[in-house]
Image (cartoon, rainbow, N blue to C red):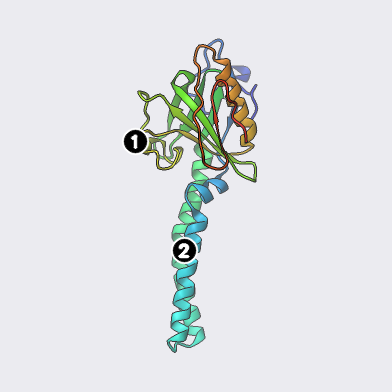
Amino acid sequence: MSAGAAAAGGRLPRGLPERLPDGERLLWQGAPDWRVLARHAFHLRGLALYFGVIVAYCFGSAALGGTPLAGAAVSAAKLAGLALVPISFLAAYAWAVGRVTVYSITNRRVVIQLGLTLPMTINLPFAKIEAAALKSRADGTGDISLLLNAKDKVAYLVLWPHARPWRLARPEPMLRAVPDAGRVGQLLARALAASADMPVAAVPDTQPGHVAAGSKAPVAA
C-alpha cells in the first residue's frame, strides 16, 4: 500500500490506533507475506522435511523387516496424515498472522498492529529507535529489525513472531516477510534521517544480507 492512503475522507487508516495528528503523514503500510512468514519464521519447510524423513524411515524399516510393501505403504501413509496436522496448523497460523498484521511507517514512528486473539498496537516513535537493519532475500522480501534504546523495551513474547530471533535480553521489533523490502528499507532510512532532532546511530551487522542503517547510513537491500 502506498503513502498517501492516509485518511481519505477523514476515515481512520487500517493499522493505526488513532487519527494521525497534524504534521504526521503515513508514508507506507503493508503486511507480511504469509508464505514467507511460514517458511522463515515458523520453519515450515524444515518441519516438513523432518516428518518426511521419519515417514521414509518408517516405511524403509517396515519393508526391510519383512512387512509387505502394501502394508508398509499404508502405515507410512497414516503417519504422513498425522504429520500433516501440525504442518497444516502452522500454515494456517502463518496465514492468519499475515491477515491481522499491519505494519505502518509515518514520518515520525513505526506502528505494528498485531495479535489474533488479543489485538494490540505497538507504537515505536523514531526517538526510541537506535538503529534499523535489513535482511533481504532473493525473492525481494526481507525483514527489517529495529534496535530500540536500552531503556525502551517491548517484551519478546508480546512481539513474537514480529521479533528478531534470539534477541531475548534486548528484544528487537521486526517487520517480517515484507514484500519489496529494499524499497521499504530505504523509505524508513530516509524518514529516520529526516528526523534531525532524533538521530539514529548505525549499528554494524555481519550477517549476510544485513545492512545496518541510521541517520547517516541508509538501509539497502
* Nearer to us in this view, 152 or 72: 152
- Give the percent coordinates (x, y) of residue 65: 42, 86
Q: Left or right: 30 with respect to 157?
A: right
Q: Earlier in the sequence, mark 1 or mark 2?
A: 2
- Give the percent coordinates (x, y) of residue 117: 40, 39
Name the mark nearer the viewer: 1 or 2: 1
Residue 170 occupies quadrant: top left
Crowd band around label 2 with a 10 angstrom C-alpha radius: few (<14), some (14–19), many (20+) = few
Residue 217 visible somewhere in the drawing: yes
Q: CA distance from mark 1 to mark 2?
A: 30 Å
The residue to which callout 1 is attached is 169
Question: Which residue is drawn at the image coordinates 49% and 22% (left, top)?
Answer: 201
Three-letter residue code for mark 1: Ala
- Give the percent coordinates (x, y) of residue 138: 64, 45
Question: Which residue is drawn at the image coordinates 35% and 33% (left, top)?
Answer: 155
Q: Quadrant of the C terminus?
A: top right
Residue 195 occupies quadrant: top right
Q: Left or right: 119 with respect to 103?
A: left
Q: Quadrant of the N terminus?
A: top right
Three-letter residue code for mark 2: Tyr
Residue 11 visible somewhere in the drawing: no
Give the answer, above or below, for where 40 lies relative to 17.
Answer: below
- Give the percent coordinates (x, y) of residue 108: 52, 18
Question: Which residue is drawn at the image coordinates 45% and 64% (left, top)?
Answer: 83
* Nearer to us in this view, 58 or 22: 58
The residue to which callout 2 is attached is 50
Give the answer, above or below, for where 24 lies relative to 113.
Answer: above
* Nearer to us in this view, 36 or 221: 221
Judged from the image, the secondary structure of the residue bearing numbered disc 1 is loop
Judged from the image, the secondary structure of the residue bearing numbered disc 2 is helix
Crowd band around label 1 with a 10 angstrom C-alpha radius: few (<14), some (14–19), many (20+) = few
Question: Which disc is residue 38 wearing?
Answer: none
